[in-house]
Amino acid sequence: MNANLKKVIILLVIGAFIVAYVNLLKTPGDPITREEAIEISKNSELVKEGLTIAHRFTIETNYYNSSRLEQLKKWHSDDIFKNVPTDAFWEEKVPEGHSAWEVIWWISYQTKLGGCAVIVIVHAETATIIYEAKGIELL
């Protein structure tokens, strides 16, 4: 076989591996599980603060796949929300084609009546907290 032909074949094989590797980097990984999202949300400062004074708590989770998030983003562009800044919606922080877990901690206070809700949004592919907020106070 000609030496130049061997070099061309080797370069094509190397090029194919490089293209495949780059495509793997662009593709989001498998989403994390519900349990993993809950564990990650425990790292939220608001959750840590709430758990230090909690008598008890319950956890609610919601999974938003990429198509549902795109629906929400489209809905937020409706006229009804024209006076609301887009950064008010956590959905805008999730890149297109990705998904997220919403973890809601319902915390009952130990020292007083009532409690509060803490909402933590976990990016399902990168396993990072992208949003956290203290929700309503319960009496």
Image: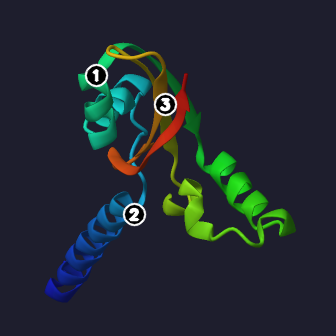
Q: Secondary structure at mark 1?
A: loop
Cα gap from disc 1 to disc 2, whole angstroms: 42 Å
Residue behind mark 1: 53
Q: Amino acid at mark 2?
A: Lys
Q: Farthest bottom residue?
A: 4
Give the residue number, with chain letter if any, for mark 2: 26
* Foreground disc of the pair 1, 3: 1
Label 1 is placed on what type of residue?
Ile
Q: Earlier in the sequence, mark 1 or mark 2?
A: 2
| Residue identifier under label 3 | 117
Q: Is residue 18 above or below residue 115?
A: below
Label 2 and label 3: CA atoms lie apart by 35 Å
Relative to residue 135, is residue 116 depicted above or below? above
In which quadrant will I find the N terminus? bottom left
Q: Percent from the top left, x then y, of residue 120?
A: 43, 40
**Foreground of the two, 57 or 98:** 57
> Residue 88 appears in which quarter of the rendering?
bottom right
Q: Is residue 28 left or right of residue 86?
A: left
The residue nearer to you, when weighing 53 against 64, is 53
Quadrant in the picture for residue 122: top left
Q: Secondary structure at mark 3?
A: strand
